[in-house]
Image (tube, grey):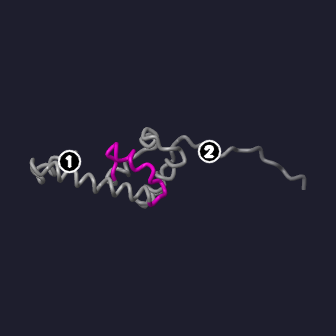
Amino acid sequence: MLDAGRQKQFGSAAGAAAQGAFLGSALRDIAKWLASIGLGEYAQRFADNAVDLSVIRDLTEQDLKDLGVLLGHRRKILRAIAQRDGVAPAPTGTATGPVLRDAVTSPW
C-alpha cells in the first residue's frame, strides 16, 4: 500500500496503475537482490508479504523464519543485509559461546 503522499501524487484514477507499477518495480528489485545472493527461490515469499528493499534492513531472524526461510539461508540473508548497510551482522542470541576447557599443564 502506498503512503498518503504517494496516493496524493498518483491521484485516484491513475493511483491503482501507478501503485501496481511502483510495487512491481520494488518487488522486482528484491527478486534481483535475492538472486544476486543465490536465494532467488524466496522472491515469491518476499513478494507475497510485500517485503522490498526499503524494509530489508528491518528484517529479523524471526521475520525470515516466519517467511519460511531455512536457517542457513536466514544467515546468508542477514549477512548480505549487513554487508549492504556496511555493518557487521548482529548476534542472534541463539548461537552458543565457546566452550571453556580445563587448562592443560605441561609436565615440562
Q: What's drawn in magenta, residue-wise?
A: 36-52
The CA span between labels 2 and 1 is 43 Å
Give the amino acid type for the residue marked by disc 1 in the picture. Answer: Leu
Cβ–Cβ under 8 Å for marks 2 and 1: no
Residue 83 locus on image (x, y percent)? 45, 60
50 falls in the magenta region: yes
36 lies above or below 70: below
Residue 49 locus on image (x, y percent)? 34, 43
**Foreground of the two, 96 or 15:** 15
**Foreground of the two, 78 or 48:** 48
- Residue in the image at 48% along x and 50% along y: 90
Residue 53 locus on image (x, y percent)? 34, 54
Q: Quadrant of the C terminus?
A: bottom right
Q: Read off the residue under disc 2.
A: 97
Q: Is residue 79 left or right of residue 55?
A: right
Q: Is residue 17 left or right of residue 35?
A: left
Per the rendering, the mark at residue 79 is none
Q: Read off the residue under disc 1.
A: 2
